[in-house]
Image: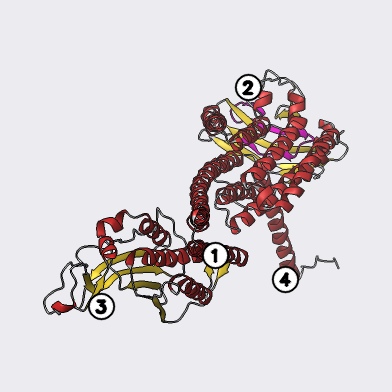
Amino acid sequence: MSAEPRALPPIVEGRWSLSRWLLALACGCALLAGAGTAAADDLGLTAGTSVLAVTPGLAVYRDPGAAMTFEQARQAFRAGRFQPSQRPWPSCGFTSDAVWVRFAVRDESGAARLWLTELRTARMGELDWYLLRGNGGLEHLAAGNLRERPPEMVDCKNPVFPLQLAAGESAEVFLRVHSETAVHLPLQIWEPKAFASAQAGNEAAFAAFFGYLAALILMSLVFSLCTRDRGYVLYSLSLLGVFGIYFIVSGYYLWLHLPGGRFAVQGGAILTIEYTMLLMMAYLRYFIDLPASMPGINRWGGRLAWCLVPATVIFLLGPYHIMYPLVTLQLLLFGVGSLTVSVLAWWRGNRVARFYTLAWLSFWILFAITQLQYRAWLPMLILPELQAILGVALGVTLFFLAMADRVRQVRRNMEQARIQVLGLEQQALREFQLQMQSQQRLIRDLHDGLGANSANIELLAERGLREKQPDGKEASLKQISRIALENSLEVRSLMDSLDSGGISWSELLEKVRSRAALVFDPAGVTWEIAVSGELPEADLPALAGLSLLRLLREGSNNIFKHSFTRSVSFRLEFTPQACGLVIEDDGCGFQPDLARSGRGLKHMRQRVEELGGTLRLETGLCQTQQLRAVNPAQAQACPRDLIRPNPPAGTQAGAVQSDEFFSCTECVGTRLTFDIPLPLRFHDPSAAPAGATT
């Protein structure tokens, strides 16, 4: 029997069919994935492309030894050691490694075109550009700040490599970057016309920025000459440092082939930063007036300023990739410290610190935004370099406004101080005038009191010497004794008042009583002193109290010498606001014209006005017709409207003698009224109200 082949069970046959389908699906997915990776790896440049960011297809590798060749880098890429970039603008920071980046491009425009690849940073030390074409051709360009620019590259402050592609051609680009500065890799591919247009706008922005800084520098120097304010000089010198910093880091210094370009890229940047920081510290010290407002902070600021000099030397001698981050940290700490000091000064009431605070806030806010954009944490609306110069322009403008506000505030303070000085001068002049017036009063009192009494003593002594009758000599001696006693009381009163610095109202009344008794008792004139109201508790100033005593004394003397009175009354009326003094007698009165021209009454008016009061003189106030006889001598000294040669109607004729004159017995001969404000003190004659004197 021949053996027949056995058929596979249907279930087994079905299993084999499912396995084939799964294998085919896996192979298809692998092919699609490979095709997708290849498509994503190549950057397509079409006819409508104006600018294209290289980041989506960029792969990065860091060479620690910085000795890898191009072929080794190509093998490392094939081995999968390059890592795709995760940031729009890759940044490796400060590193001693050589950084390799690789991307592939394919021309899809349908015609041969020239494209420009720009590395949008001007501070890379060494750049090696390798273009590997599809046919195996290799092109190499060496550039960077430490090398001469090759003629094949575009003349621009940033490295720009030409990329000539044929229609449909694909190529690989390897770029090696090795630099002591921070490594940033913002790569873009431009269509030439679009690049020229964007470059013109970029250059215009920087030209406007540098022109604005130059205008502020010149303007501040002019203002310093006009205002004689050294703050504008410090501000302009600080702006020179800012100008130098951005002129170096933006690449213009090297692009213009200025001398010392290689040093400027590293050491020049450090020098300008340290110089600007030193000037800004001096500007802050002057602007907020730290020596007066914050002496402790000012001392520490001076010490830190002195530390900048050796620190600058250390930063210049040390490795740049280590020292420059320290300089940046130092600048950051200075900015935070300056902002803190300005906020503290503003909180303490320094209004001019507000613009200074806003200037630092605006600068640091835009600086922080720029750093976040470099790390792809925030979207980039404009180029970070343009955003940085915008922040600086805003900051220096606010600094300028702060300086102008400070000058305005200083001038306002000077004007207020000038007004205060004028007020103090006027007050000092018034006090000096019052002091001189006090001295004149004292001299006048000594002259009118002691001087007059001394003259009387001299006259009485001479008369006594000439007098031959004993009674006459005795009368002269009695008068001399009385005047000497009066002088003694006067000197004692003056010395007591000056020594004590004041006199109480009760002591004043006691002196008035003593004076009245001394003057009126020997002449047989009755007198009384009446007080109404409460005596003030406060003592009188010495000279003011003496002046009031002189008023009462002068009034008593006038009554004793001229009124021929028989009775005198003194009334003192006190209220919380004023003191009223009334001296009244029943004598023959005054003639108004003679009273106004008399020296004694003139002195009394002056004293009352110096005390801020008023004086009122009333004479010849007749109330009844009760008469009394007076002798002819007394009648000749009295006004004729009070003394009549004949008695009025109703008088007994037998009682009248031919040589007798008559006056009213109840007429008020003289009434002196003083109204003086309390507390008693001398007033400025130019400011005192004019006393109504009649």
Residue 240, percent across and down? 64, 31
* Labelled pair 3, 2 in contact (Cβ < 8 Å): no
Q: Residue at label 1?
A: 481
Is residue 268 shown above or below 7? above
Residue 68, percent across and down? 85, 34
Check disc 1: other Cα within 10 Å, few if <14, some if 14-19, many if 20+.
few
**Which label's residue is closer to the chain start, 4 or 1?**
4
Q: Name which residue lies at 28% across and 61% down.
A: 637
**Which label's residue is closer to the chain start, 3 or 4?**
4
**Which label's residue is closer to the chain start, 2 or 1?**
2
Q: Which of marks 3 and 1 is in front?
A: 1
Check disc 2: other Cα within 10 Å, few if <14, some if 14-19, many if 20+.
few
Single out the residue that lies furthest toward the left.
649
Q: Residue at label 2?
A: 155
Task: Measure the C-alpha gap from mark 4 to mark 2.
Answer: 77 Å
Task: Measure the C-alpha gap from mark 4 to mark 1.
Answer: 168 Å
Magenta residues, dominant SS class: strand
* Labelled pair 2, 1 in contact (Cβ < 8 Å): no
* Labelled pair 4, 1 in contact (Cβ < 8 Å): no
The numbered disc on residue 10 is 4
Task: Measure the C-alpha gap from mark 2 to mark 1.
Answer: 120 Å
In the drawing, does residue 558 fall left or right of residue 90? left
In the drawing, does residue 417 fall left or right of residue 175? left
In the image, what residue type sits under mark 1? Ser
In the drawing, does residue 621 fall left or right of residue 165? left
Is residue 127 on the magenta stretch?
no
Q: Which of marks 2 and 1 is in front?
A: 1
Single out the residue that lies furthest toward the top.
151
Q: Name which residue lies at 64% across and 43% down.
A: 286
